Image (tube, rainbow, N blue to C red):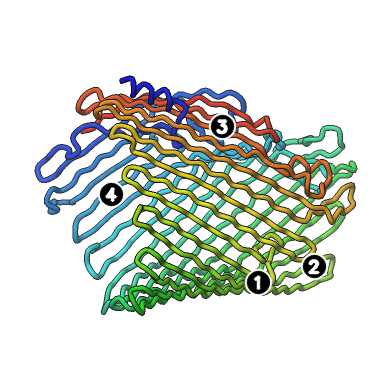
Amino acid sequence: MKLILAAIAFLLPIAAQQPVAPSTEFVGRARGEDFGNYNLVQNYELGVRFHGVGGSENKYRSDVNFRNGLRLLASRFSLNSKDGRGRLFDELSVWTQGLGNDPYQSAGLRARKNRWWHYDMLWRSNAFFNPGLAIATGQHAIDTERRLQDHDLTLLPQSRLRFFIGLSQAAQSGPALSTANVFDVRDDEYLLFTGIDRRQREFRFGNELKVFGVKLHWMRTWERYEESSPYRIDGAQQGNNTADRSALARFTRTEPYTGSTPGWRVNILKEGRLLWGVNARLTHTTGRRQFALDESAGGVDRGGSARDRQILVGGDALRPVTTGHLTFSIFPSERLSITNHSGFHNTRMEGNSSYVELSNGAFAFDRLDFQFLGIRGFTNSTDASFQAARRLRFHGGHQYSTRVIRSVEQQGFTGFTNRFERRQENHVHAGMFGLRLQTLSGFTLALDGELGRQDRPFFPIADKDYHGLNARAVYRRKNLWISAAARSAYKFNGAGLSVHSARARTYSLDASWQAWGWLAIETGYSKLHSDTASGLAYFDSANLVSGARSLWVSNIHAVNLAANLSLRDRVNLSLGLSRTEDSGGNSSSAPAPAAVFAPAQQFPMLFQSPSARLSIKLTGKLRWNAGYQYYGYREITLPALNYRAHTGFTSLLWTF
């Protein structure tokens, strides 16, 4: 007992990274109860959550969002045929998690009748709360719930000819706040309220068959998306700046959006007798989008003049997307394998999209038409792997990719029309290499590297001249496992008027140790260093300032410790700690931009979460659980978002 108490005292600072509820322990007989030709296993965990928050509760809701109240933390019902020949079904299982008011709830159903059909259902509900940045003074926020469900039915699951039917649905709804700048970019901002309403549905039907060693899998899909989120301001509104003359008398905005996406998915697989294999995949969708925006506003601008403006935006466009992949592998010998992979992607948006702005007061009429955007990409890579010795393997390869981007738009202002066509093409060559080494003592070493060059990156921050190196070592010895890894990624770009470079280095160390049968310990540490230097251009008092540089520096340290202590299957104690800190860095070595941008060169912050969970077996079928978890968040740049939260739960777990 002294040894146990000493271990507990030593491990008290340790906490788990995951929430402490629901529990992972179960009681009762693993084989369940017999009912005729079926075996039944059930477990239900009913509990109460509690929490207390100090500081920014909005930030806590954005990160964690666990609240007070009664919950069905977890449950599982499983009924299985003992001989696989049930009358109506051979397997029926239902499971739930977080039902009652947890921010993340889910439920699932699985039913199977061997040789005839399989059915799977998954339901999820995610409460999403985002208070927006502190600089928005609470005027940017969203509080919605996303509900998702998937249904999949397989007919003749164990035969060479299978059929698939599926349905997926997603919906998002809830209130949201935003702001709008109406008459002029230098004008005032006004608070807008809307009710989010988004819905998506997909129906699919497919088949899989095997003929002469070739497996063909195809799926036909129909997808429908709808969104309707109207904005409205009733009555006069002064705006955020009460000292100016700008005021809004009325504002309405409706922007319904609908779209349908029918498509095909095809997969073909053929394997030779240990000598070669072919895998081909093809997807094609022909999306159609219809959208409209009707905005009407009236009031007084910052100059004191009456304004009446109307904006109409509409379009009806096709969005065909085609992707294809072909993989061919050959195995000349047991030591050598060669794989060639080709990929093709083509995305187009074609149709008419118009922006029309009408100002009644100034009798101005502006129009902008967008007609076409096309992105076509092709990639080919060849990789080879050679087993030089029993415990030594080398691999290497080359990858080539090209991308073409084209666009067409048309502008019209007071009777004058311009048509603009743009095209850009870029090419990337990359080489990969590496090795795998394994020793008799349980030590494994993996080394990988990549070197790439791109002639014309589309964005200044895209990869141009880059290289990366990875190393990972693993040691296994009885009940001890240790892993160490190091990664680096460097890129240096010079595109257009801006020069961009980025460097990232990651180091990690993880270990787990089953010290005794009743004590297990896991720990991990990682450090991520990144610094990015880019060109910076901005306006200061209506004057363009260019030639400045911006440097972002980040040093993230993350520590995870966890321990599990079990006493004769009656008492289980889990302890741990999760701590993540970004210490920032010294950015004074880079040419400084305007002083107002200096605080944005780094983002020092600290997040830590110790926790503990205790589970005690009361009877053969009943277990009592209790847990506590602390969340602490602190940052220097925006201290208004700092918070500390105490959360916990207590529950009873019944298993039979």
Q: Earlier in the sequence, mark 4 or mark 2?
A: 4
Q: Secondary structure at mark 4?
A: strand
Measured along the vertical axis of the image, is residue 197 above or below residue 471?
above
- Residue, disc 2: 412
Q: Earlier in the sequence, mark 3 or mark 1?
A: 3
Measured along the vertical axis of the image, is residue 490 above or below residue 47?
below
The one of 15 and 332 positioned closer to us in this rendering: 332
Q: Are marks 2 and 1 in contact (CB under 8 Å)?
A: no
Name the residue located 51 percent from the left edge and 68 percent from the top edge: 433
- Left of 618 or right of it: where is 650? right
Q: Quadrant of residue 201?
A: bottom left
- Residue, disc 1: 405
The one of 77 and 509 positioned closer to us in this rendering: 509
- Residue, disc 4: 110
- Left of 339 or right of it: where is 431? right
Marks 4 and 3, how far apart at CA: 35 Å
Packing grade of label 3 (10 A; few <14, some 14-19, many >=20) is: many
Q: Secondary structure at mark 3?
A: helix
Marks 2 and 1, how far apart at CA: 24 Å
The three-letter amino acid code for the residue at tag 1 is Ile
Q: Secondary structure at mark 1?
A: strand
The three-letter amino acid code for the residue at tag 4 is Arg
Pair 4/2: label in front: 4
